[in-house]
Image (cartoon, helix red, strand yellow):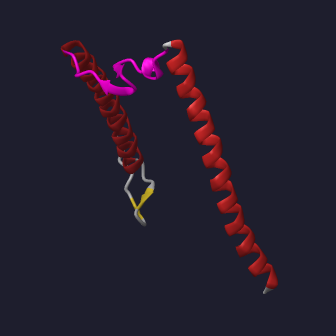
Amino acid sequence: MSQRDNFSGGFVLGAIFGGVVGGILGATLVSRQLGQGEGDGEDLSAGLPEAKATKGRSFFKPPTEQGIEAARQGLEDKIAQLNDAIDDVRQQLSNVNHNGIEVGGERALAKDP
């Protein structure tokens, strides 16, 4: 029984300690990052392709026609790939069912061409 009490107490103490240390470390790293961005004139959102910073705030640009068209084309390509994969799996399952392999506890009859 004492091992359980020690584990519970240690777990709670470790969670609290980890939260405090992680919070302090995170706050320190963020403040350093913000300090570098202001001093060098760098934009923290520079890594984002469609973002711009305005006095410490970042706002996303509205989508452009070209961006919307590119996204639509990409989605159409992915949908076509998924449809092809679904058709392949459907064909494979159809072949399995027609070759006399057990399906759902019943033996399917093999068909001779």
Task: For the C terminus, give its image quadrant.
Answer: top left
Q: Position of residue 49 (x, y in %)?
A: 38, 17
Residue range of the region highlighted in magenta in the rendering: 42-64
Nearer to the camera, 72 or 104: 72
> In the shown orientation, is residue 64 left or right of residue 59?
left
Query: Residue at 38% of width from left, 45% of height from top?
Result: 93
- Judge whether 88 appears above or below 74 on screen: below
Nearer to the camera, 95 or 30: 30
> In the shown orientation, is residue 23 left or right of residue 66?
right
Q: Position of residue 33 (x, y in %)?
A: 57, 27
Q: Quadrant of residue 62?
A: top left
Task: For the N terminus, give its image quadrant.
Answer: bottom right
94 part of magenta stretch: no
50 part of magenta stretch: yes
- Judge whether 67 appears above or below 17 on screen: above
Q: Position of residue 82 (x, y in %)?
A: 34, 33
Query: Residue at 45% of width from left, 54% of height from top?
Result: 101
Query: Residue at 60% of width from left, 29% of height from top?
Result: 32
Q: Position of residue 91 (x, y in %)?
A: 35, 38
Query: Residue at 75% of width from left, 73% of height from top?
Result: 7
Nearer to the camera, 85 or 40: 40
- Judge whether 55 appears above or below 27 on screen: above
